[in-house]
Image: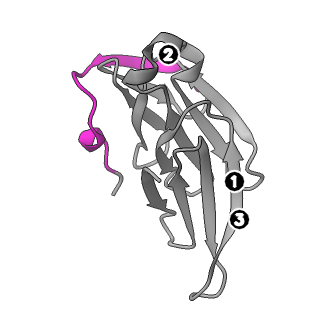
Amino acid sequence: MSECKPLPDGTRLATAAQDGTVRVWGDVDGDEWQLVASLEGHSYAVTSCAWSPDGSRLASTSGPSQADDDARSQAECSVIVWEANTWGRVTTLEGHENNVCSCAFSPYGARLASASDDETICVWDANTWHELARLEAGTCTRSHFRST
């Protein structure tokens, strides 16, 4: 597991796994947690996940590590956005050229930002999913984004 993010109200927890899945856990009765969904769609390890502020969507990031450099394609360096009611895929955001290592929604959920080892940050409109900006940011670290 590379990351663990609670839903803002604390009733669910998303975990980013090395096997390319995102697992969502639900609080059954305040004491017991159970697996609610296992989301598959990434070709590589899931590096990060983030809930939208209202909890209606979950974004997850992935991409090949430096060791997998020869097999890289833009489609594998992606952000997948999931609908929290159905766990269906809303969209796949492509545009980074290397491992996408972090993501975060803006405080009101209108934007989603993703950071990559290609040294860019992409800012996406969370309604249309169009890329709004690409920032040259330097080396990616997990500290690029932190949800509060």
Q: Which numbered disc flags the more N-terminal residue, 1 or 2?
A: 1
- Residue 49 painted magenta: no
> The residue under label 2 is which amino acid type?
Gly
Tag 1 near tag 2, CB within 8 Å: no
Q: Quadrant of the C terminus?
A: bottom left
> The residue under label 1 is which amino acid type?
Ser
Locate residue 22 relative to residue 6 in the image: left or right: right
Q: Which residue is mark 1?
A: 38
Q: Residue at image x 39%, y 18%?
A: 133
Q: Residue at image x 34%, y 17%?
A: 118
Q: Which residue is mark 2?
A: 95
Q: Position of residue 25 (x, y in %)?
A: 61, 67
Is 37 placed above or below 22 here? below
What is the span of residues highlighted in magenta in the rendered image? 129-146
Considering depth in this image, is 133 or 27 the residue closer to the camera?
A: 27
Q: Which residue is mark 3?
A: 36
